[in-house]
Amino acid sequence: MPTLLEELVADLNKNVFYREFSYSKNVFVPSAAETEIEFADHVVWVDDLLVIYQLKERDPGGDQSEDSERKWFRKKVLNSATKQVRDTLQFLEEHPRIEITNQRGHTLNVNSGSIRHIVKLVLYKPSASLPVDCLTTKSHLSRTAGLIHIVAWDDYQGLCGTLITPAEVAEYFHFRERLLTKHSAADITSERALVGQFLMGDSDATPDEQNSLLVSRLITDLEAFDISFLLDGVADRIEHQEGTGSDVDYYGIIVEFAKLTRLELKEVKTRFTLCIDAVKANWLTAPMRMITAGSRCGFAFIPTERENVPRRLTGLKNLSHIAKYEQRLNRLVGMSIAKEGTDFLIDWCLLDFPWKRDDVLEAAVRDRNPFRPLRSVVRPRYHIRT
């Protein structure tokens, strides 16, 4: 039976990281063996990013003196949990097939060859008597595993509530590792202040508890970048897909949205809303696009006039190829938006293969390219109330 903490983490992560990338059933059977092995207490796996969670929860009964709580922390959190993290890393090295089940019920093989970034995280739920010297412990440095993050459950809840998107939570832990590596333990502030410093985007500055004030002054504006409604049912609306090799067809699409920051998600929602307005009024509107700065994935948004609805899928495929080719991209997500009667029709296309010269597409870009020129825009990601 899962512990309370395991249930809490699973419930939070399926919302922050989506059910497709949150794994709470993590036992596997190695080849030539009959015994199940636990891979980790919880896993988040988004494309080339793997977050390993080991969870420790203090039994509320029994002796809760400071000395007893300190012994529990050292034994369970610093020793046992960090060893389990090292074991997980060893499993990745030794076993070519590790099948785990996500919270969507899909079982996938963790391909260690495709994982480039690993976040190692111990979450613990302490009693009220845990001494300050334990509560202020932010990491454990392992000779073989490197830096392992140590985070109290309440702090993890708080940072997920502030950062919200999968990309930003993952980016925060990379930022946090740089801070913890660069500064001494005496310099490190509360978790909330570290999150505040992340909002500032300054990993060179010495941590300062005053940065915690930035968290409460953050203007979240969730409505501006929440596109959860758009991703519901993507699996049933994929009309064209090339070169993905994905075990689950629609994962290749939603993984690109999971990589976006709130600023990029806001740009997606803005373009989608403009397309909705165009098809509502049946305006002739040029298709729109954007390219992410980090992964260089393209997104094409294609509004379809009423008379072209029967040909919308051909348009989706052709225009997605043109958008991908012109910008020399290896991956592009295309979206067609149309209106038929009272229904909005949203269809998807995923192109995932290396760019190479193509004479037909070269001519299409030259003669039939409906896209406006792209421009680079630099905007602050977070808005802090003054």
Image (cartoon, rainbow, N blue to C red):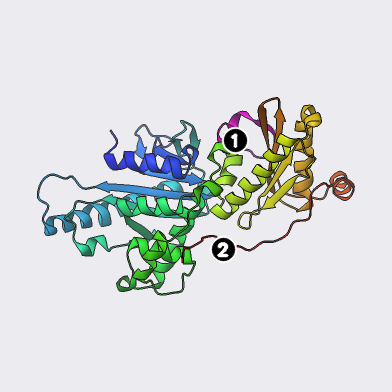
Where is residue 314 shown, x and y percent of the image?
Answer: 79, 33
Where is residue 258 shown, x and y percent of the image?
Answer: 54, 46
Height in image: 352 above or below 133? above
Question: Which one is closest to the eye, mark 1 or mark 2?
Answer: 2
The kind of residue on which mark 2 rests is Pro
Where is residue 363 shown, x and y percent of the image?
Answer: 89, 47
Can you see residue 301? Answer: yes
Of labels 1 and 2, earlier in sequence is 1
Magenta region: which residues? 231-248
**Is 245 inside the magenta-drawn segment?**
yes
Residue pictured at 53% horizontal, 40% vertical: 228
Most foreground residue, 217 or 107 = 217
Height in image: 252 above or below 264? above
- Disc marking residue 220: none
Identity of the residue furthest to the front in this view: 281
Q: Are marks 1 and 2 in contact (CB under 8 Å)?
A: no
Most foreground residue, 321 or 157 = 157
Most foreground residue, 277 or 185 = 277
Horizontal relation, residue 203 to residue 342: left or right: left
Most foreground residue, 66 or 260 = 260
Height in image: 183 above or below 232? below
Horizontal relation, residue 138 to residue 93: left or right: left
Q: Which residue is mark 1?
A: 250
Residue pictured at 49% horizontal, 57% vertical: 171
Residue pictured at 73% horizontal, 39% vertical: 303
Check the picture and name the quadrant holding the N terminus.
top left
Q: Which residue is mark 2?
A: 380
Can you see residue 47? Answer: no
How many neighbours does mark 2 have within 10 angstroms: few (below 14), some (14-19), or many (20 or more)? few
Identity of the residue furthest to the top in this view: 341
**Is 52 inside the magenta-drawn segment?**
no
Where is residue 75 shown, x and y percent of the image?
Answer: 21, 54
